[in-house]
Image (cartoon, rainbow, N blue to C red):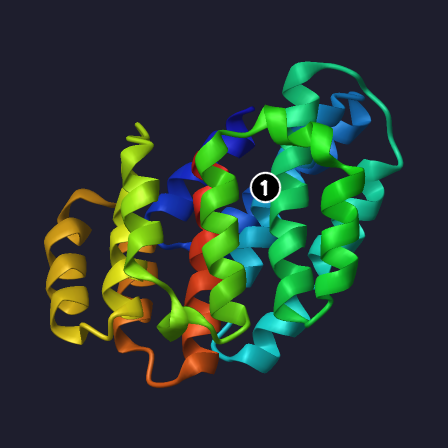
Amino acid sequence: MLYGLLGDLMLINGKLKEAKKYYELSAKIEVELQYLMNYFWAKIRAAVCDILRAKSLTELKRKSKILEKLWKEVDDLEEPTAPYLRVKAKILACYFVYLALNGRTDEMLQLMEEKIRLDMYLPKHVDYLLKYIIKIFNEEIEKENHTSFTEIEIENTQNELFNDIIKIIHFLSIRDKWNTRNYVRQISKKYGITLKKLLYEIVKAQNIDELKVAFFKLFCFYILSV
């Protein structure tokens, strides 16, 4: 547990190499103790630390391959406890965006249908955000209708980060770069170093590939927080 807490501290403060090291140490101990939920929780956090260091789409695709390996590992085991299934659902959500990023949409949709029961172990707004991330990967963000974002806001979620991300996506969808930049500057003050950097990566993105990288990383970080 101590290594996991140290990893969390490093992650929040942008020390990704150190965070990954602590999470891997935590995973090693947890698997020896047969605490599978804690083991997979440490493994997904270590994987995300590596993903957050990606600087390009090519590097992101390479680093995120670990998500496929991790999903297959967690899917092979059956432990019918709610905490374990919540961790499994988080790994699956990250795996969905990995499949979408790599153009494996049919495979992703089939898996969504097969594993639909895992939906109950994540907040509903995760599905909403996943939908829009996939649209970005399909380069459809500028085709999005403003009305759908209004409908999401009606859900009135209690997750502050989710609401902020949806607002950013809305500004991007209507090509409002000024308000995107201004809003990120405004909200970044309440978040830690790592999240602040991820938000500014969205603002600085010069093309769709850079936007894909920024949102993939942000989604993976977001999943750890829900």
The percent coordinates of residue 88 (x first, y second) are 69, 33
Q: Is residue 34 visible?
A: yes
Query: Which one is in front, 188 or 194?
Result: 188
Q: Residue at x 49, y 29 (%)?
A: 123
Residue at the right extreme?
A: 76
Are there few (<14), some (14-19), or many (20+) residues within 10 Å of tag 1?
A: many
Position of the C terminus by quadrant: top left
Residue located 78% across and 21% down the image? 33
Of residues 80 and 166, the one drawn nearer to the viewer in this rendering: 166
In percent of the image, x 33 and y 85: which residue is there? 206
Q: Is residue 59 left or right of residue 13?
A: right
Q: How many marks?
A: 1
Q: Which residue is mark 1?
A: 23
- Where 82 falls versus 39 (above or below)? above
Q: Is residue 33 left or right of residue 175?
A: right
Q: Which amino acid type is shown beneath numbered disc 1?
A: Tyr
